[in-house]
Amino acid sequence: MCHSILARARRRVMTVSSAVLLVTAPVAANPPVGDGNAVTDWNTVATAAVLVSPGRIFDSRALAIVHAAIHDALNAIDRRYEPYAVDLSAPSASVDAAVAAAAHDTLVKVSPGTVATTEAAYAATLLQIPDGPAKDAGIALGRLCAQAILDRRATDGASTANVPVYVPTGMPGDYDFTPPFDRPPLGPLALFPSWGDVAAWGIDLTQHAAPGPDPLHSIQYALDFNYLKAIGSVDSAWRTAAQTEIARFWAEGAPAGWNRIANTVIRQKRLDPWKAARILALVNFASADSFIASFNGKYHFRFWRPSTAIQRGNEDGNGLTEQDANWQPLFSGPPPFVAPPIPDYPSNHAVVGAAVAEVLTHFFGERVRFNTTSTTLPGVTRSFRGFTEAAVENGLSRAYAGIHFLRAIVDGYWQGRGIGRSIEKLLPPAQEESR
C-alpha cells in the first residue's frame, strides 16, 4: 500500500513540476555579464551586507528600504518613473552621489552589523566623484530620500513581530517547536508570529491569501506525507544526488539569492540606472510582501513541519500514513541546513521565488538564460533558461531538504505569482514619458 501511495505522490509532483515548466537538465552558459552601474554596484554591497544581518525576513525589509530610497533619489534627478514615497526635484544632482548616499544612509540603519563595510564602500565611491555642487546636491538628495523611507517604515510593525510569544497546543497538525529550536540554548522558539501584521509595501493582503493545507484525514495529505517521508529523509534512497545539490544550493536566504539573479540579468541587459533602480525596487517589494503574506498564513494555519508530522504519524487519524519516530530530514542541521523555527504552510521560500520571478518575467520575458551561484554551496553554478524554471526549482528544494510539504510549496508558488503580478504594477512610468 505504501509503495502505491508513494508512486502516486511521485506522479503528483511530476505533474505539478511539468505544469510550471520545471527543467533540471544542464543548459548553455549565459552571455557575458555587462558592466554595472551605481545601482547594481550598491545592490551588490547591500546584498552582501544583509547576509550577516539577523535573518532573511529582515533581509527582505532591509533591501526594500534600500532600493526604495535609491529609486526615489534617481527620479528626483530625472522623473522617469513615479516615486514611491518622496516627491523631490534635484535635476543638477550627481547620480552616483545620490545613489551612494541613499544606499549608505539606509544600510547603516537596517544592517548595523556591517557599518564598517558600508562606510568603506561609501568612502570609495565618493572619492571617484569630482567635488563640487553636483556631488554635494547628490549627497543631500540621497540622504533626504533615505530618511523619508526610514521614517515611513519606522512604525510598520516589524519591531514587534515577535509578540506575542508562540505557544503550541500539542494537537495533531499544530506546529510544534523543531530541533534545534525546541530546547535551550536556541529555544523553545517560533519566530515572528506577528510578521504577517507588518505593513505591506504594495499589496492588499486580503487578495493574496493561500487556501490552506490539506486536512490530516485526506488522501492528498497521505500522498504528501509519504512523498516527503521518502524523498526528504536524511538517508533517503529516493532522492538523487542532483536533488540533494538543489536542496543545498537553494538553502541560502531567498532575498539574497534572488537579488543576485536580478542583478546578473540587469547587467546582462546593460540597463541604465533608472530602469535598474525600478526593477530592483519592485523585486524587493515583492520579496518583502511575500514574507508578510506567507507569515500571515503560517501563523493562521499553524501547520506542523514534516519532521513532526512523520515522527507523530500515529496521531493524524489517517490510515494511509505510518509513524517513524526516528525520522530526520536532510536538513537536520547545523544552520543554514535546518528547518527555520516557523510553521510549514505556506513555504515562504516558494512564495518569494515565485513573486520575484513574476516581476522579472514581466520586464525581461521568460526566455532569459542566466547563471547563478549560492553562498550555501560555494563553487557550484546553476544555469537556467528562465525565471519560472528557477522559481520552481527553488520551491521544490524545500521538499528535497525534507522541511516542507508539497502543498506548502505548490500553494506558496501560486500565492507568490499573484503577489508578483500586483507588485509589477507599482512605480509606473511618469506621465510625460508615457505620452
Image: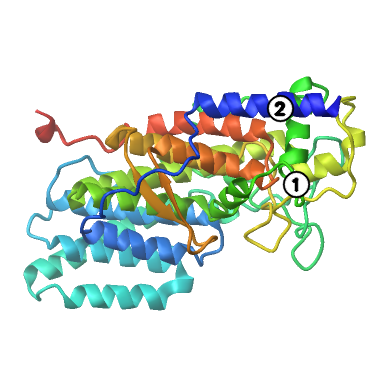
Residue 83 coordinates in the image, percent (x, y): 24, 44
Q: Which residue is mark 1?
A: 236
Residue 288: image location, x then y, percent: 46, 46
Residue that numbered label 2 is attached to: 9
| Amino acid type assigned to the residue bearing label 1 in the image | Ser
Looking at the picture, tell me which residue is in the foreground, 345 or 147.
Answer: 345
Asked if residue 420 shows in the view, the reply is: yes
Q: Amino acid at mark 2?
A: Ala
- In the displayed structure, 429 sits above or below 101; it is above
Give x and y (percent) for residue 285. 40, 44
Q: Secondary structure at mark 1?
A: loop
Q: Count residues near mark 1 (Cα–Cα under 10 Å), then give few for <14, some for 14-19, many for 20+.
A: some
Horizontal side, residue 365 vs residue 140: left or right? right
Residue at 45 percent across and 53 percent down: it is 257
Q: Quadrant where the C terminus lies?
A: top left
The correct choice, above or below, for 128 with respect to 355 in the image is: below
- Find residue 310 and report its image quarter: top right
| Residue 246 relative to residue 62: left or right | right
